[in-house]
Amino acid sequence: MSLFDLSGQRALVSGASRGLGLQMAGALARAGADLVITARDVASLEEPRRQLESYGNTVECVALDLQHEESIQAAVETATATGHLDILVNNAGCNIRKPAMDVRWEDWNTILDTNLRGMFFMTQRVAESMLIRQRGRVINIGSVTSVFGYAGLGPYCASRGGVKQLTMSMADEFGPHGITVNCLAPGWFRTAQNDVLYQDKEWLEYLVDRIPLRRPGKAEDLDGAVVFLASDASSYVTGQTLLVDGGISTGATRAMPRSSS
């Protein structure tokens, strides 16, 4: 189990004020990591900080808006002023659900600037110190839409597909320097962003029928995956997209009837 021990390491988790980001930060803390957590509104991190500190780790809160280069630069400078970063979890992201014909220029820019451009330049800044130390773990949070396309999610699917490709490019570039870069891609998890969908009983039944494990994801289903990718257990894993999706990416459409034989 020492392969999964993150004691003495420091992880930055972006977008950690709630939901899956907060859950993954908690998993890393329970594995021993000290934390830097970010959100656009740093005040929203006070309660998460208290929750995460209960695991006995240090937790620093930093403001970060991925749409602005100066915010990325300031956030990384603040985070590294008190110690180096061993782990980066690029979780912060956004979505705007609209039919393709209703998407505005501004919608596209908001989603791609946050989910893809912002992720790239956040990694670039953090990687500066990782390259000096010749070691690091970068975990880009993608989605099942990194490999699947869904109607009404055009810009979002484009951004998450880009995350998958960006992960492979960075893995190739940073690998010789001891830095692994992987994409953790959750399937259908109930979050604040998509809660309205889960209130539709008919849609939820349709979704569950497509998931071999017959349920949407629970936040804690990501714990093992994020710790694995952050730890020495994954030291020979890079450039990969790990789908934690209950099997929906198998392409199942409905349950097959049981044979009577």
Image (spheres, rainbow, N blue to C red):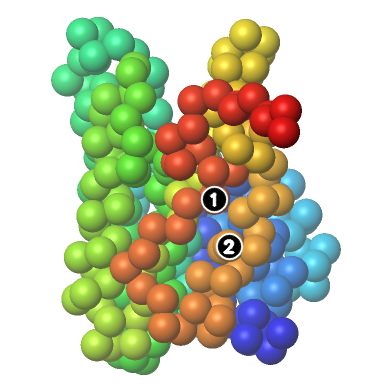
* Tag shown at residue 225: 2
Instruction: For label 1, count other residues whose C-alpha is less than 10 Å away and answer few (under 14), some (14-19) or many (20+).
Output: many
Left/right of residue 158 with respect to residue 256 in the rendered view = left
Residue for point 64% across, 80% down? 4
* Quadrant in which the N terminus is drawn: bottom right
Residue for point 70% across, 51% down? 220
Amino acid tagged 1: Val
- Does residue 261 sit above or below 83 in this rendering? above
- Work out how far the residue at label 2 is from the one at label 1, CA to CA, in angstroms: 8 Å
Q: Residue furthest front?
A: 261
Quadrant of the image occupied by residue 76? bottom left
Left/right of residue 115 with respect to residue 228 in the rendered view = left
How many numbered marks, from 0 up? 2
- Coordinates of residue 22 in the picture (x, y in percent): 64, 50
State which tag comes first along the sequence, 2 or 1. 2
Whether residue 35 is visible to the viewer of this picture, yes or no, is no
* Quadrant in which the C terminus is drawn: top right
Instruction: For label 2, count other residues whose C-alpha is less than 10 Å away and answer few (under 14), some (14-19) or many (20+).
Output: some
Residue for point 73% across, 60% down? 52
Whether residue 249 is visible to the viewer of this picture, yes or no, is yes
The reply to whether dot 2 and dot 1 touch (C-beta < 8 Å) is yes
Which sits in the foreground, 81 or 87?
87
**Which secondary structure, mark 2?**
helix
- Coordinates of residue 202 in the picture (x, y in percent): 62, 8
Amino acid tagged 2: Ala
- Coordinates of residue 142 in the picture (x, y in percent): 40, 48
- Does residue 158 sit above or below 173 in this rendering? above
Q: Which residue is mark 1?
A: 244
Which sits in the foreground, 119 or 260?
260
